[in-house]
Image (tube, grey):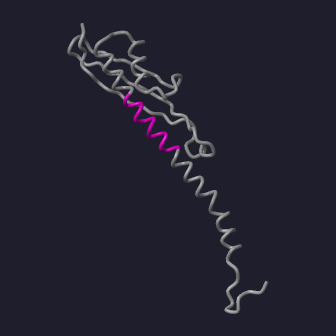
Amino acid sequence: MRPPPDGRGSQGGTAAVEFALVLPLVLMVALALVQTGLLVRDRLLVEAATRAGARAAAVQDDPSAIRTAALAAAPSLEDGSVEVEVARAGLRGEPVTVSLRYAAPVRVPFVEWLFGGPVGMNASTTARQEFG
């Protein structure tokens, strides 16, 4: 096939090569954005879990019930990666603090190397004790 008389050749092959070179980079960026969105969701769930745990700790003293309340507020967190701690200061009217640590896994394939393994998240909430 001859090139057109004005000297311009076909650009179809060049565009395909450029697309093939750029596509992996675009896919990596898209996957990294999806993983970042999942981590933001996990962070919001960790904060909601500490608030629920603090509410439960304000009305009861049972550590397993406090942990259950915190995990019920964030059901998509992996139970084995959650650590809940309760710190009390005195009795009725005094503060109780619930702290939660979570190791959020990297769920999206091909981007593990960007995040370097599980991402640690910490949150704590303080409430006033209503019993005692």
**Which percent across, then down, holds residue 23?**
63, 60
Does the stretch in magenta take in 53? no
Residue 42: within the magenta? Answer: yes
Residue 18, relative to residue 50: is it above or below? below
> In the picture, which quadrant includes the C terminus?
top left
Residue 116: horizontal and vertical position, in percent? 57, 41
Task: Please give the name of the residue rendered at 49% of the width and 40% of the height, measured from the top-left corner.
Answer: 38
Which of these two is toward me, 33 or 92?
33
Residue most toward the top? 132
Q: Quadrant of the N terminus?
A: bottom right
Q: Residue at x 44, y 40 (%)?
A: 40
Q: Residue at x 39, y 26 (%)?
A: 49
Position in image of residue 68 (x %, y %)? 42, 17
- What kind of secondary structure does the magenta stretch mostly adopt? helix
Residue drawn at 43 percent across, 27 percent down: 74
For the view shown, which residue lies furthest in the right direction? 1
**Quadrant of residue 18 in the image?**
bottom right
In the displayed structure, does residue 85 sit left or right of residue 4? left
Range of residues picked out in magenta? 35-48
Q: Position of residue 121 (x, y in %)?
A: 45, 33
Q: Is residue 11 left or right of residue 77?
A: right
Looking at the image, is 130 positioned above or below residue 111? above
